[in-house]
Structures are given as C-alpha cells and as structure tokens.
Image (cartoon, rainbow, N blue to C red):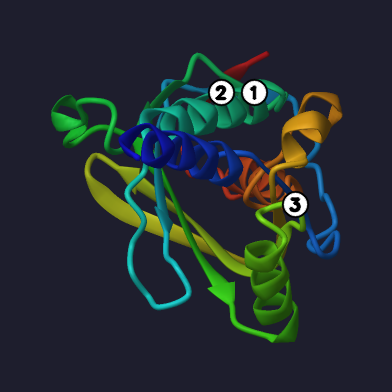
C-alpha cells in the first residue's frame, strides 16, 4: 500500500510539473525603439507569485526558479538596447547586496480564472485518471519597477490572460514545443524598449 501511495504521488508530480502556456492574444503589439546606444550595469530581480483559484500562494520549487532565470536571461540578452546586466531570482538568490543599486524588479502575479472551461476540464481530468488535460485561463499581471540608487523612479504595468494546459500527455508533447512564458513575450520586450525610450538609466555608445 505504501508503494502504491508513493507511485501515485510521483504520477501527480509529473502531471502537475509539465504544462504548455501561451497568451490568448498578441496584445500588446511589439513596439521596438530605435537603438543607437546601450544601457549597462542594470540588475534585474524576477519575483514570481502564482496563486491558486482560492487565493493561496503556491510554493515555488527550484526548477521553476531556474526556468524563470533561463527565460528572462534570454529575453533581456536578445534586446539590442541592453548590455552587461545581472539577473537575480527572488527566493533563490541572495539580494542583500542590491540595496541602493540601480535595479529593475520584474514582478509577475498569476491567478486562475474560475469559469466553465476550468470547472469542466478539472472534472474530466479527475474522472479520466489524468488523461484529459486541465485547461485554465490565467490572469497575469507583470509589473516592471525601475529603481535608481534605491528609489523608485517609474513603474510599468501590463495585464493579460494566459492559457495553461496541464496533463499526463503533455509529457510527450512538451519536448517538441517552443519556449513557453507565463507572460506574453511582447510584454518584457516592450518594457526593455520603454525604459530605453524613457532614458531612465545612463547609456553608452554601442
């Protein structure tokens, strides 16, 4: 009996740790700036707060933190406006040395939207022994808060909806999908261009 409980726990973990996410729409449209200089020496801090349908905060495991590091490092590196940045993950890295420095906090908050799709897919997920996937609409708010010498100088807020699909069969689909982001990829891309246009930090020639 104990072995069965362990196997059941492993199965549930595999199901819930594999998902595909994509934005419901392409808003906002990507709006690149004309780049002639680069911003350097900025510290980015990613803070991810996922809530369940009842408003309880999920505990984030190390794999999620590492995935966020990889995703946002790639996004920021791909922007022609950015050079020589550092990226930290709240809950994984030591942030004590960042006090008083130029930094940008990337705060992502998510919460499932309880609707007919959520209720129906959750019911089918249970009665089909996890074969039918859960399909959730998720409200996502991404805030970019720029600090200079420890003082907040500007805040950008983006809100959108994400579709998340979880299920046992995702194990076979996931390796063939492109990178997934909990926020519309245009959101961080636009933000990086926005702080460039707003000249929030010193720039240097490319």
The reply to whether residue 86 is in sight is: yes
In three-dimensional space, the C-alpha distance between marks 3 and 1, rounded to whole angstroms, equals: 33 Å
Secondary element at image label 2:
helix
User: Is residue 155 or residue 58 the one in the foreground?
Assistant: 58
Q: Give coordinates of residue 3: x percent, y percent.
A: 37, 31
Q: Quadrant of the N terminus?
A: top left
User: On the image, numbered disc 2 is attached to which residue?
Assistant: 70
> Mark 1 — residue?
74
Q: CA distance from mark 2 to mark 1?
A: 6 Å
Point out which mark residue 93 bears. none
Question: x and y percent of residue 161 in the render?
Answer: 69, 68
SS for dot 1: helix
Residue at 31% over, 42% down: 148
Q: Which quarter of the image is occupied by the C terminus?
A: top right
Residue at 35% across / 37% down in the picture? 103
Q: Residue at x 72, y 79 (%)?
A: 120
Instruction: In the rendered view, tell whether residue 12 sits above or below residue 53.
Output: above
- Give the alpha-carbon distance from disc 2 to disc 3, as whole Å: 30 Å
Which mark is on residue 131?
Answer: 3
Q: Can residue 160 be seen here?
A: no
Could you classify mark 1 by the number of other residues whose Cα lies within 10 Å: few (under 14), some (14-19), or many (20 or more)? few
Q: Could you tell me residue 66's position as x and y percent?
A: 46, 25
Q: Earlier in the sequence, mark 3 or mark 1?
A: 1
Residue 71 in the figure: left or right of residue 146: right
């Amino acid at each position: 009996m104990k072995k069965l409980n362990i196997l059941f726990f492993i199965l549930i973990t595999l199901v819930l740790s594999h998902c595909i996410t994509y934005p419901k729409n392409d808003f906002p449209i990507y709006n690149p700036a004309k780049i002639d200089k680069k911003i350097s020496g900025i510290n980015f801090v990613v803070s991810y707060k996922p809530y369940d349908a009842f408003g309880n905060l999920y505990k984030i495991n190390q794999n999620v933190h590492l995935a966020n590091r990889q995703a946002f490092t790639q996004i920021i590196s791909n922007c022609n406006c950015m050079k020589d940045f550092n990226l930290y993950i709240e809950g994984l890295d030591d942030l004590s040395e960042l006090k008083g420095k130029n930094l940008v906090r990337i705060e992502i908050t998510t919460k499932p939207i309880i609707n007919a799709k959520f209720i129906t897919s959750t019911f089918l997920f249970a009665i089909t022994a996890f074969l039918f996937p859960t399909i959730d609409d998720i409200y996502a708010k991404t805030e970019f808060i720029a600090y200079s010498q420890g003082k907040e100088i500007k805040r950008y807020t983006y809100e959108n909806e994400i579709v998340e699909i979880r299920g046992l069969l995702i194990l076979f689909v996931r390796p063939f999908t492109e990178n997934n982001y909990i926020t519309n990829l245009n959101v961080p891309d636009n933000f990086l261009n926005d702080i460039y246009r707003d000249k929030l930090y010193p720039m240097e020639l490319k």
